[in-house]
Amino acid sequence: MNSPAQLATQIRFHLDTLGETNSHHPFEQLCLGLTRRRIVSNVIPATGPVSAGGDGGRDAESFWSVLAKELPETSFFTALATEDAVVLAVTAQRDNVPSKIRSDLSKMCGKGEPVDRVIYFTITPVDTAKRHDLQAHAREEYSVGLEIWDAQAIANEIACPDLFYLAVEYLHVPSSLAPEREEADSDLPDWYVDTRDRWRTRSAHAGSMGEFVDLREAIRFSSLNLEARADLPDWLESARVLRNAAQDDSNMVDRIDYEMIIATGLGLNTLRPVDGTLRAYFDRTASKPTDLGALVDAITLLRLTQATQPRGATTITVNEVAAWADDLENVLDRELEAVPGENARVSLLSTAAILALGPREFTPGELSTVPIAGPKMSDVYQEVSAAKREGRPLPSAPQDAQLRDLNAGMAHLVNLVAALPSAPMAPLDQLMTMFDLTAPALIDHPDYFDIRNALDRATIERAGRTAAGERAQSRAIALLQAYRPLDALHEIHAAKLNWLNGDAAEGAAIMMLLASDVYSDLGLPLAAKQYAMSAASIAKATGDPRLAVLMARGIILTATYEHQAGQWLAATRTFQVGIWAQSQLADDPWNFERYPYFENMLVDQCLIIRTATALRPALLPTLESVVQSTYLDELVKPMLAAAADVELLDESATIDSADRSGLGRPFSDTGPVREYSWSAFGNVWVVTTPNDRVHVLAAERFVAAAQITLGDLAAEDLLLLPGEICIEIEVSDKPVEPHSVFLPASERDRGENRHRVLLTRAGRLTPDADQLEVASATFQVIVTQSLLGTPALKAVMERTFERGLPHMLTCVRPYDELVDIHKDEFYEEIRGLSPGVLDPDRPRLPQPGPGLTQRLPEHATAYDHAASLDAIEGRYEMLHPPVRLTLPRLASQPGFRELVTKLRTDGWKDWHLLTAVANIVVNKRAAHRGLNMTTSITQADMNRFRSLMEEEERPDDPETPAEAFTEDEMWFHLANAARATAGHWGLELRLDRFEPHIFLNVLGDRFNYWNDDVEHAPILPA
């Protein structure tokens, strides 16, 4: 084996031979290869016949790049990139080389683009003094830097293992003299090294498909992997040579151009060197018959160009990109018209949908105002690749993504899913991935759910339920990234169900934990608790050691959700169980970074102890005994000591803090009555039950079901009346008859403001019957608060069950079995503790979870603007006669005029005033005439009242005193009249006791009640 010095000497000999034979071109190619690997990587050959001086003295020059600034020293390749204008000059001349260099400097720097640096290669040695003299001349005359590489310097570098191929290819040095590779090359796979060595010594190219495939794999690897990135310029040059050899085969040229463009864009983070290639590629695509694969490739290049434009890394204009997209669309339309078979038709529809549902092209104005350049394409690729390897979510489209043509894309998909049964062989993987990751931008389209369901059915038929679960998971995560948690929940449940049915326990457990996290973020902690314990149950049932830690995670998360629900003693006891599980089932169990859920609950535990210390010291012995039993106090004490100087909140401030955080009232699990409170869609739910094991499990079964149902009903416009919903849970040892499960407050004893829910004790019913019972109770509570009519509510319930509410409510096992981890003694202990819940008399006002918002239309479905105006016009006509004398009298009363001013400030129109006044007056008039105007009014009296409303007021009718027209009476009678109006809209007000302002504000928000009016004569004299 030759030493490096010996090898360099042999290379020097071969360089001298080049000089003797005046072999300029091989020397130029050798110097170009050396430059790319040692001096500056972003350099390309200049144009023109070099030996004739047609390149202006420039054998090669650097293309524009910002890699050097953006990724300094992050890889061998990027460390060599430059933003400077670098010119490479090469001479094989043996005599008078300094004069040659001066002459070439004049040519290079005297015309053309400005030059920053010149790299000059010569076969002839240049001594140090002359070298310095030439460098000073370049600096003083042309303000450029000059580097001179003579034969010895060249030989020393080419003797290195990674450049020796240049000696073999251009100097014909025997390959047997190759030096040993350094260990750094071991990072490259053997196939790549073998391919690289083969291409470095290749002397002829046939332009064959075999050559293309061989090159394609290597150029892709080089462009996409930093450890091989330094080879990329050589691979691109090989691709250009292969392209020349294949120039008569247009399809092969397209394939090679595609690889060159992709490799340049991803590997060099610029498209400028291949902008011309791109233009020619799309010109060919638009003007010749194209196969489907080429169309997909063209769309890929279109997307790459769009992504590169904001960085200024291409000269291609937005107008060019838009024209290319239009050309592709036209090609697809033509192909679809002529396609002969269903498989081909589905494939074309898939491609057309991918084009239409991709990002819209920039406009010139938009591109000029892009605030940031965005990430480099190589970074994007590396991040996506890492995410795939590590199982992390892929980046998805934002909800407000500007797509090229949403309606056209969805129309293509509608046609595609209709044709799917006849096209079982059509490939859909790329389309489905695009659909899942674009879900946030598609979900509000009316055809989305039909398309999604059809694609999921196709996935199940082709790949099974586990694959369908993975797709649903992808959509769920995309929707979570787009801050659409309620929509994500439906996908999470679909993924969970598919994985359970596909015997994929790990996927199902992970989806349950994700569901628990989403429910918690929505402020629905008992729903979160049910799903956390379901995950723990699955992990236990599998017996798989890899899933064992999910048991501990599920239990500790349950403690976190109990803390969120205000069940602070229960949370402490559950945390104790979770710690035991963590210590037995987790590796390195106390590693906070690895198990953040453990740290989160530890922080909550410290908060519980601090609050008890300040506000409920009687609870401390119970809390401390639990904490000490697991040696958790060794972690808690330092944390409490660190917070010792932080002022403790008083009771009022603690409740304020809990309400702002959406927590249940702290310590609401102590004392004889347990309480659960949360907020959703304008209602505060307060559920109470006796604080014993049987009642608590039943109450939580109901609360979890109610919270899960509310999460599903967010998609529905329920027209709920805001306010507090109070429910008392009772338990029967015998199965409860369906009609006895729910008793509204209005049918209970006088003065009772709580609904009663009577549930069957756990274990007395089948799981399906148990589920039906809690679902029925939940719906009946919601129905009392909804203004929807009965037919509309039935339709809502049908849609809810179609969306899969039953499998959402019961997950793996019945609720009572899942969460029953504490003994009767624990319930007895906390039932006897007092004082317990903080400020029990203060209203419950927990804030809803930030994601628990409904996406409702501006107006309710039943609202008709034209019909509303007609009805208002009718009121002005019909309600004036019965009060024609009363109105002038009231207008003369200063007190009434002040009231009118106040009400108008509150939004009252004249027809509101007229309605309230007419109802007050006619009610008084009806009572004077002997009508029964109580809640037991007969139908006959109701008919007589309607007749009175149509009668013109007479002078002998008794006057209604001014004091009858108070603000409360005006609001009450307006609301009563609106209740009748709501009936005409198909609405029902089921609450006997309701707040007029709240009811009327719902009508105002959803039926334009406070805004609609028509032109009319003044109802009150001036």
Image (cartoon, rainbow, N blue to C red):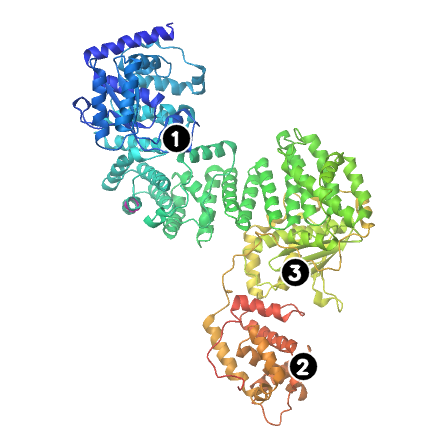
Q: Which residue is mark 3?
A: 781
Q: Is residue 554 above or below residue 649?
A: above
Q: Nearer the viewer, residue 967 or 480?
A: 967
Left or right: where does residue 288 sit relative to residue 408?
Answer: left
Spatial CA span between label 2 and label 1: 88 Å
Left or right: where does residue 892 sit relative to residue 58?
Answer: right
Q: Nearer the viewer, residue 313 or 507?
A: 313
Give the number of the disc on residue 933.
Answer: 2
1 or 3: mark nearer the eye: 1
Residue 185 falls in image quadrant: top left
Q: Secondary structure at mark 3?
A: helix
Label 3 vs 2, first from the N-terminus: 3
Please indicate, yes or no, whether residue 536 appears anywhere in the rendered image.
Answer: no
Quadrant in which the N terminus is drawn? top left
Q: Residue at x 57, y 66 (%)?
A: 1002
Q: Residue at x 27, y 14 (%)?
A: 126
> Dot 1 surroundings within 10 Å: few (below 14), some, or many (20 or more)?
some
Q: Position of residue 517 (x, y in %)?
A: 60, 44
Give the number of the disc on residue 1022.
Answer: none
Give the number of the disc on residue 68.
Answer: 1
Residue bounds of the magenta highlight: 322-329
Amino acid type, callout 3: Val
Please indicate, yes or no, whether residue 1019 appears anywhere in the rendered image.
Answer: yes
Amino acid type, callout 2: Met
